[in-house]
Protein backbone atom coordinates (compact mmCIF):
# COMPACT_ATOMS: atom_id res chain seq x y z
CA UNK A 1 0.00 0.00 0.00
CA UNK A 2 1.02 3.58 -0.59
CA UNK A 3 -0.04 6.46 1.65
CA UNK A 4 0.58 10.17 1.35
CA UNK A 5 0.55 12.32 4.46
CA UNK A 6 0.34 16.06 3.75
CA UNK A 7 1.90 18.04 6.57
CA UNK A 8 4.96 17.08 8.62
CA UNK A 9 4.06 18.92 11.80
CA UNK A 10 3.17 17.22 15.06
CA UNK A 11 -0.02 15.57 13.80
CA UNK A 12 1.27 14.68 10.34
CA UNK A 13 4.48 13.15 11.65
CA UNK A 14 2.49 11.14 14.21
CA UNK A 15 0.16 9.86 11.47
CA UNK A 16 3.13 8.93 9.29
CA UNK A 17 4.76 7.18 12.25
CA UNK A 18 1.65 5.12 12.88
CA UNK A 19 1.31 4.09 9.24
CA UNK A 20 5.00 3.24 8.95
CA UNK A 21 5.26 1.23 12.15
CA UNK A 22 1.95 -0.62 11.94
CA UNK A 23 2.60 -1.61 8.32
CA UNK A 24 6.38 -1.59 7.79
CA UNK A 25 6.10 -2.95 4.24
CA UNK A 26 3.93 -0.04 3.09
CA UNK A 27 5.26 3.11 1.43
CA UNK A 28 4.57 6.46 3.05
CA UNK A 29 5.16 9.83 1.39
CA UNK A 30 5.49 12.64 3.94
CA UNK A 31 4.96 15.93 2.12
CA UNK A 32 5.41 19.42 3.51
CA UNK A 33 6.11 22.90 2.20
CA UNK A 34 9.25 22.79 4.37
CA UNK A 35 11.35 19.97 2.91
CA UNK A 36 13.78 20.00 5.83
CA UNK A 37 10.96 19.47 8.31
CA UNK A 38 9.64 16.57 6.23
CA UNK A 39 13.14 15.12 5.93
CA UNK A 40 13.81 15.33 9.66
CA UNK A 41 10.51 13.65 10.49
CA UNK A 42 10.93 10.94 7.84
CA UNK A 43 14.46 10.14 9.00
CA UNK A 44 13.29 9.82 12.58
CA UNK A 45 10.43 7.48 11.64
CA UNK A 46 12.09 4.94 9.38
CA UNK A 47 13.21 3.86 5.90
CA UNK A 48 9.73 3.36 4.46
CA UNK A 49 8.93 7.08 4.81
CA UNK A 50 10.01 9.34 1.94
CA UNK A 51 10.05 13.13 2.37
CA UNK A 52 8.79 15.41 -0.37
CA UNK A 53 8.38 19.14 -0.73
CA UNK A 54 4.81 20.17 -1.52
CA UNK A 55 2.97 23.46 -1.72
CA UNK A 56 -0.71 22.43 -1.72
CA UNK A 57 -1.59 25.71 -3.43
CA UNK A 58 0.18 24.51 -6.59
CA UNK A 59 -2.47 22.19 -8.00
CA UNK A 60 -0.30 20.25 -10.42
CA UNK A 61 2.22 19.48 -7.68
CA UNK A 62 -0.57 18.40 -5.35
CA UNK A 63 -2.09 16.10 -7.98
CA UNK A 64 1.31 14.62 -8.82
CA UNK A 65 2.08 13.97 -5.15
CA UNK A 66 -1.14 12.15 -4.31
CA UNK A 67 -1.45 10.27 -7.60
CA UNK A 68 -1.30 6.51 -7.11
CA UNK A 69 -1.87 6.68 -3.35
CA UNK A 70 -4.21 4.15 -1.78
CA UNK A 71 -5.17 6.82 0.76
CA UNK A 72 -4.17 10.41 1.58
CA UNK A 73 -4.14 12.14 4.97
CA UNK A 74 -4.44 15.91 5.25
CA UNK A 75 -2.66 17.05 8.41
CA UNK A 76 -2.40 20.73 7.52
CA UNK A 77 -4.62 23.74 8.15
CA UNK A 78 -8.34 23.20 7.63
CA UNK A 79 -8.23 26.23 5.31
CA UNK A 80 -6.86 24.03 2.50
CA UNK A 81 -8.93 20.91 3.13
CA UNK A 82 -11.44 21.80 0.42
CA UNK A 83 -8.79 22.07 -2.27
CA UNK A 84 -7.14 18.86 -1.08
CA UNK A 85 -10.55 17.17 -1.21
CA UNK A 86 -11.14 18.47 -4.75
CA UNK A 87 -7.69 17.26 -5.84
CA UNK A 88 -8.30 13.82 -4.33
CA UNK A 89 -11.58 13.54 -6.23
CA UNK A 90 -9.85 14.57 -9.46
CA UNK A 91 -7.05 12.04 -8.86
CA UNK A 92 -9.48 9.33 -7.79
CA UNK A 93 -7.86 8.62 -4.40
CA UNK A 94 -9.36 8.28 -0.92
CA UNK A 95 -8.61 11.08 1.53
CA UNK A 96 -9.23 11.83 5.19
CA UNK A 97 -8.41 14.90 7.27
CA UNK A 98 -8.41 16.15 10.85
CA UNK A 99 -11.14 18.74 10.36
CA UNK A 100 -11.12 21.85 12.49
CA UNK A 101 -13.84 24.04 10.99
CA UNK A 102 -17.54 23.29 10.50
CA UNK A 103 -17.92 25.68 7.55
CA UNK A 104 -15.11 23.91 5.69
CA UNK A 105 -16.68 20.51 6.38
CA UNK A 106 -20.02 21.81 5.06
CA UNK A 107 -18.29 22.80 1.80
CA UNK A 108 -16.61 19.39 1.58
CA UNK A 109 -20.00 17.70 1.93
CA UNK A 110 -21.20 19.50 -1.22
CA UNK A 111 -18.58 17.47 -3.15
CA UNK A 112 -20.30 14.20 -2.28
CA UNK A 113 -21.60 13.49 -5.77
CA UNK A 114 -18.17 13.99 -7.33
CA UNK A 115 -16.59 11.60 -4.85
CA UNK A 116 -19.22 8.95 -5.57
CA UNK A 117 -18.72 9.37 -9.30
CA UNK A 118 -14.99 8.69 -8.87
CA UNK A 119 -15.75 5.75 -6.55
CA UNK A 120 -13.77 7.21 -3.66
CA UNK A 121 -14.40 8.14 -0.04
CA UNK A 122 -13.60 11.44 1.65
CA UNK A 123 -13.69 11.40 5.45
CA UNK A 124 -13.36 14.81 7.15
CA UNK A 125 -13.12 15.31 10.93
CA UNK A 126 -10.97 12.27 11.71
CA UNK A 127 -9.26 13.59 14.83
CA UNK A 128 -10.23 13.28 18.47
CA UNK A 129 -13.19 15.64 18.79
CA UNK A 130 -14.73 15.77 16.30
CA UNK A 131 -13.68 12.32 15.20
CA UNK A 132 -13.06 9.51 17.64
CA UNK A 133 -15.66 10.72 20.16
CA UNK A 134 -18.30 10.78 17.36
CA UNK A 135 -17.41 7.21 16.40
CA UNK A 136 -17.79 6.05 20.00
CA UNK A 137 -21.16 7.81 20.27
CA UNK A 138 -22.50 6.01 17.20
CA UNK A 139 -21.03 2.66 18.24
CA UNK A 140 -22.84 2.94 21.57
CA UNK A 141 -26.04 4.22 20.01
CA UNK A 142 -26.33 1.04 17.94
CA UNK A 143 -26.88 -0.95 21.15
CA UNK A 144 -30.12 0.88 21.96
CA UNK A 145 -33.63 0.60 20.60
CA UNK A 146 -34.38 4.05 21.99
CA UNK A 147 -31.71 6.58 23.00
CA UNK A 148 -32.65 9.32 25.43
CA UNK A 149 -29.38 11.21 25.83
CA UNK A 150 -25.77 11.29 24.64
CA UNK A 151 -23.18 13.16 26.68
CA UNK A 152 -19.71 13.57 25.18
CA UNK A 153 -16.82 14.88 27.29
CA UNK A 154 -13.22 15.38 26.08
CA UNK A 155 -10.22 17.29 27.37
CA UNK A 156 -6.51 17.75 26.74
CA UNK A 157 -4.71 18.65 29.97
CA UNK A 158 -1.22 19.15 31.39
CA UNK A 159 -0.15 16.42 33.77
CA UNK A 160 1.08 19.06 36.24
CA UNK A 161 -1.26 22.08 35.98
CA UNK A 162 -0.01 25.54 36.90
CA UNK A 163 -2.07 28.51 38.02
CA UNK A 164 -3.81 30.68 37.12
CA UNK A 165 -5.54 28.76 34.27
CA UNK A 166 -4.32 25.20 35.06
CA UNK A 167 -3.87 24.59 31.34
CA UNK A 168 -1.23 24.44 28.64
CA UNK A 169 -1.55 24.76 24.88
CA UNK A 170 -1.87 21.30 23.32
CA UNK A 171 -3.12 22.46 19.91
CA UNK A 172 -3.49 25.80 18.12
CA UNK A 173 -4.25 28.87 20.21
CA UNK A 174 -6.66 30.11 17.55
CA UNK A 175 -8.53 26.83 17.75
CA UNK A 176 -8.78 27.13 21.53
CA UNK A 177 -10.19 30.66 21.34
CA UNK A 178 -12.68 29.59 18.68
CA UNK A 179 -13.92 26.78 20.90
CA UNK A 180 -14.51 29.24 23.72
CA UNK A 181 -16.14 32.15 21.86
CA UNK A 182 -18.33 30.48 19.21
CA UNK A 183 -21.75 29.04 19.96
CA UNK A 184 -22.07 25.34 20.77
CA UNK A 185 -24.62 23.12 19.00
CA UNK A 186 -26.73 20.91 21.27
CA UNK A 187 -29.98 18.97 21.12
CA UNK A 188 -32.29 19.71 24.04
CA UNK A 189 -35.68 18.10 24.39
CA UNK A 190 -35.50 17.11 20.74
CA UNK A 191 -34.66 20.60 19.46
CA UNK A 192 -31.36 21.50 17.81
CA UNK A 193 -30.17 24.81 19.21
CA UNK A 194 -27.14 27.00 19.80
CA UNK A 195 -25.93 27.78 23.33
CA UNK A 196 -23.13 29.92 24.70
CA UNK A 197 -19.75 28.29 25.23
CA UNK A 198 -18.19 28.36 28.72
CA UNK A 199 -21.61 27.68 30.27
CA UNK A 200 -23.36 24.77 32.05
CA UNK A 201 -20.34 23.85 34.16
CA UNK A 202 -20.53 20.39 35.71
CA UNK A 203 -18.19 18.31 37.85
CA UNK A 204 -16.78 15.11 36.34
CA UNK A 205 -14.68 12.38 37.99
CA UNK A 206 -11.84 10.31 36.56
CA UNK A 207 -9.74 7.77 38.44
CA UNK A 208 -6.38 9.17 39.61
CA UNK A 209 -7.34 12.66 38.42
CA UNK A 210 -10.02 13.49 40.94
CA UNK A 211 -12.77 15.99 40.28
CA UNK A 212 -12.51 17.98 37.06
CA UNK A 213 -14.97 20.32 35.35
CA UNK A 214 -16.70 20.21 31.97
CA UNK A 215 -18.50 22.98 30.10
CA UNK A 216 -20.00 23.79 26.72
CA UNK A 217 -17.60 24.55 23.84
CA UNK A 218 -18.10 24.77 20.10
CA UNK A 219 -17.10 22.47 17.27
CA UNK A 220 -16.36 19.32 19.25
CA UNK A 221 -18.85 17.08 17.45
CA UNK A 222 -19.44 19.03 14.21
CA UNK A 223 -21.97 17.12 12.06
CA UNK A 224 -23.20 14.75 14.78
CA UNK A 225 -26.00 17.03 16.01
CA UNK A 226 -27.54 17.23 12.52
CA UNK A 227 -27.19 13.48 12.03
CA UNK A 228 -28.92 12.64 15.32
CA UNK A 229 -31.61 15.31 15.31
CA UNK A 230 -34.90 13.45 15.67
CA UNK A 231 -33.15 10.32 16.90
CA UNK A 232 -32.07 11.41 20.39
CA UNK A 233 -33.79 13.75 22.78
CA UNK A 234 -30.65 15.27 24.26
CA UNK A 235 -27.09 15.53 22.95
CA UNK A 236 -24.27 17.76 24.09
CA UNK A 237 -20.50 18.04 24.01
CA UNK A 238 -18.38 19.58 26.76
CA UNK A 239 -14.67 20.23 27.15
CA UNK A 240 -12.93 18.93 30.28
CA UNK A 241 -10.53 21.11 32.26
CA UNK A 242 -9.14 21.33 35.78
CA UNK A 243 -11.51 23.03 38.21
CA UNK A 244 -11.54 26.81 38.09
CA UNK A 245 -10.36 27.15 34.50
CA UNK A 246 -13.71 28.01 32.93
CA UNK A 247 -14.60 30.88 35.25
CA UNK A 248 -11.19 32.50 34.93
CA UNK A 249 -11.07 32.23 31.15
CA UNK A 250 -14.63 33.53 30.83
CA UNK A 251 -13.66 36.57 32.88
CA UNK A 252 -10.93 37.37 30.35
CA UNK A 253 -13.39 37.05 27.47
CA UNK A 254 -15.95 39.19 29.27
CA UNK A 255 -13.27 41.89 29.58
CA UNK A 256 -12.88 41.90 25.79
CA UNK A 257 -9.59 40.06 25.38
CA UNK A 258 -10.84 38.10 22.35
CA UNK A 259 -12.58 40.88 20.44
CA UNK A 260 -11.49 42.15 17.04
CA UNK A 261 -11.16 45.70 18.30
CA UNK A 262 -7.81 47.19 17.18
CA UNK A 263 -5.05 47.96 19.65
CA UNK A 264 -1.58 49.47 19.22
CA UNK A 265 1.14 47.01 20.31
CA UNK A 266 4.83 47.86 19.89
CA UNK A 267 4.17 50.31 17.10
CA UNK A 268 1.92 48.00 15.09
CA UNK A 269 -1.84 47.56 15.05
CA UNK A 270 -3.27 44.27 16.23
CA UNK A 271 -6.68 43.17 17.40
CA UNK A 272 -7.29 42.37 21.04
CA UNK A 273 -7.74 38.77 19.95
CA UNK A 274 -4.38 38.61 18.17
CA UNK A 275 -2.63 40.13 21.17
CA UNK A 276 -4.44 37.72 23.50
CA UNK A 277 -3.39 34.75 21.35
CA UNK A 278 0.26 35.84 21.58
CA UNK A 279 0.01 36.12 25.36
CA UNK A 280 -1.51 32.65 25.62
CA UNK A 281 1.28 31.17 23.49
CA UNK A 282 3.92 32.71 25.74
CA UNK A 283 2.28 31.91 29.07
CA UNK A 284 0.61 28.54 28.39
CA UNK A 285 3.29 26.73 26.41
CA UNK A 286 5.42 25.53 29.32
CA UNK A 287 6.29 22.12 27.93
CA UNK A 288 4.63 19.84 30.46
CA UNK A 289 3.70 16.29 29.48
CA UNK A 290 0.03 16.08 28.61
CA UNK A 291 -2.87 13.69 29.02
CA UNK A 292 -6.21 13.19 27.29
CA UNK A 293 -9.47 12.30 29.04
CA UNK A 294 -12.58 11.29 27.13
CA UNK A 295 -15.98 9.83 27.96
CA UNK A 296 -19.07 9.07 25.88
CA UNK A 297 -22.23 8.30 27.88
CA UNK A 298 -25.36 7.02 26.16
CA UNK A 299 -28.61 6.59 28.07
CA UNK A 300 -31.61 4.74 26.69
CA UNK A 301 -33.44 1.44 26.56
CA UNK A 302 -32.91 -1.95 24.94
CA UNK A 303 -35.79 -4.40 24.71
CA UNK A 304 -37.68 -2.40 27.29
CA UNK A 305 -34.82 -2.26 29.82
CA UNK A 306 -33.23 1.07 30.70
CA UNK A 307 -29.44 1.16 30.73
CA UNK A 308 -26.44 3.51 30.59
CA UNK A 309 -23.51 2.70 28.32
CA UNK A 310 -20.15 4.40 28.84
CA UNK A 311 -16.97 4.44 26.75
CA UNK A 312 -13.99 6.19 28.31
CA UNK A 313 -10.22 6.40 28.21
CA UNK A 314 -7.28 8.30 29.63
CA UNK A 315 -4.12 8.52 27.53
CA UNK A 316 -0.75 9.94 28.57
CA UNK A 317 2.33 11.40 26.91
CA UNK A 318 4.43 8.52 25.56
CA UNK A 319 8.02 8.76 26.82
CA UNK A 320 9.24 6.05 24.45
CA UNK A 321 8.18 7.87 21.27
CA UNK A 322 8.10 11.39 22.76
CA UNK A 323 4.60 11.79 21.44
CA UNK A 324 2.00 13.85 23.22
CA UNK A 325 -1.30 12.26 24.14
CA UNK A 326 -2.96 14.78 21.84
CA UNK A 327 -0.82 13.56 18.92
CA UNK A 328 -1.63 9.93 19.70
CA UNK A 329 -5.39 10.38 20.09
CA UNK A 330 -5.73 12.70 17.09
CA UNK A 331 -3.28 11.29 14.54
CA UNK A 332 -3.60 7.57 15.29
CA UNK A 333 -7.38 7.39 14.65
CA UNK A 334 -6.81 9.33 11.43
CA UNK A 335 -4.11 6.89 10.32
CA UNK A 336 -6.36 3.95 11.16
CA UNK A 337 -9.14 5.45 9.03
CA UNK A 338 -6.67 5.87 6.15
CA UNK A 339 -5.80 2.18 6.45
CA UNK A 340 -9.50 1.27 6.51
CA UNK A 341 -9.96 3.23 3.29
CA UNK A 342 -6.95 1.63 1.62
CA UNK A 343 -7.93 -1.91 2.61
CA UNK A 344 -11.62 -1.56 1.80
CA UNK A 345 -12.85 -1.87 5.40
CA UNK A 346 -14.76 1.34 4.65
CA UNK A 347 -16.68 0.58 1.47
CA UNK A 348 -19.24 3.38 1.41
CA UNK A 349 -18.51 6.12 -1.12
CA UNK A 350 -18.90 9.89 -1.07
CA UNK A 351 -18.01 12.57 1.47
CA UNK A 352 -18.83 10.95 4.80
CA UNK A 353 -18.10 12.06 8.37
CA UNK A 354 -16.46 9.30 10.45
CA UNK A 355 -19.56 8.65 12.54
CA UNK A 356 -21.32 7.59 9.32
CA UNK A 357 -18.77 5.18 7.87
CA UNK A 358 -16.12 4.10 10.43
CA UNK A 359 -16.82 0.79 12.24
CA UNK A 360 -16.48 1.59 15.93
CA UNK A 361 -15.58 -1.90 17.08
CA UNK A 362 -12.69 -2.09 14.61
CA UNK A 363 -11.47 1.39 15.64
CA UNK A 364 -11.52 0.43 19.32
CA UNK A 365 -9.60 -2.77 18.58
CA UNK A 366 -6.95 -0.98 16.51
CA UNK A 367 -6.44 1.71 19.13
CA UNK A 368 -6.02 -1.03 21.73
CA UNK A 369 -3.06 -2.34 19.73
CA UNK A 370 -1.55 1.14 20.09
CA UNK A 371 -2.09 1.07 23.86
CA UNK A 372 -4.99 3.50 23.76
CA UNK A 373 -7.35 1.43 25.89
CA UNK A 374 -11.01 2.36 25.57
CA UNK A 375 -13.01 0.91 28.45
CA UNK A 376 -16.65 0.01 27.92
CA UNK A 377 -19.06 -0.47 30.79
CA UNK A 378 -22.81 -0.72 31.26
CA UNK A 379 -24.61 0.51 34.34
CA UNK A 380 -28.18 0.86 35.53
CA UNK A 381 -29.61 4.40 35.28
CA UNK A 382 -29.87 6.43 38.46
CA UNK A 383 -33.34 6.85 39.90
Image (cartoon, rainbow, N blue to C red):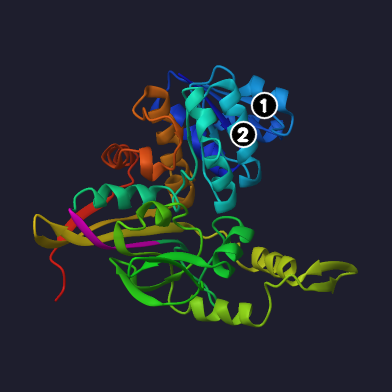
Q: Quadrant of the C terminus?
A: bottom left
Q: In the rendered view, does 212 fall on the left or right side of 86?
A: left
Q: In the rendered view, does 343 fall on the left or right side of 6?
A: left
Q: Residues within 10 Å of mark 1 (few under 14, many from 20)?
A: many
Q: Which mark is residue 62?
A: 1
Residue depicted at x 32% and y 59%: 295
Residue depicted at x 62% and y 77%: 253
Q: Which residue is mark 2?
A: 84
Q: In the rendered view, does 318 fall on the left or right side of 254?
A: left
When the figure is inspected, residue 180 is found, relative to residue 89, above or below; the finding is below
Residue depicted at x 66% and y 83%: 255
Decide if residue 101 is in sight here. no
Q: Residues within 10 Å of mark 2 (few under 14, many from 20)?
A: many
Give the x, y percent position of residue 15: 49, 36
Specify the segment rendered in magenta: 145-153
Q: In the rendered view, does 287 fall on the left or right side of 301?
A: right
Give the x, y percent position of residue 239: 44, 65
Q: Quadrant of the N terminus?
A: top left
Decide if residue 7 is in sight here. yes
Q: Quadrant of residue 208?
A: bottom left
SS for tag 1? helix
Instruction: Check if mark 1's residue and mark 2's residue have beta carbons within 8 Å.
Output: yes
Amino acid sequence: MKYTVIGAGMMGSAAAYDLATSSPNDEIILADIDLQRATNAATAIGPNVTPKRLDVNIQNDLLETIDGSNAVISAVSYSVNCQITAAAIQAGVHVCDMGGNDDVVAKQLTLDAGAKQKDITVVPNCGLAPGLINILAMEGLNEFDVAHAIQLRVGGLPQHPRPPLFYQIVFSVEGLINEYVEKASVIRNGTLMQVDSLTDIEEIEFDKLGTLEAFNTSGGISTLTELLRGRVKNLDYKTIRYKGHCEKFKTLLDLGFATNEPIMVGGSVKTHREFFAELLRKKLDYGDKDLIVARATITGSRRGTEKVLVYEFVDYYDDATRMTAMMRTTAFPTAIIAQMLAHGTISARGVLPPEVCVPGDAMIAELGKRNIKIVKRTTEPRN
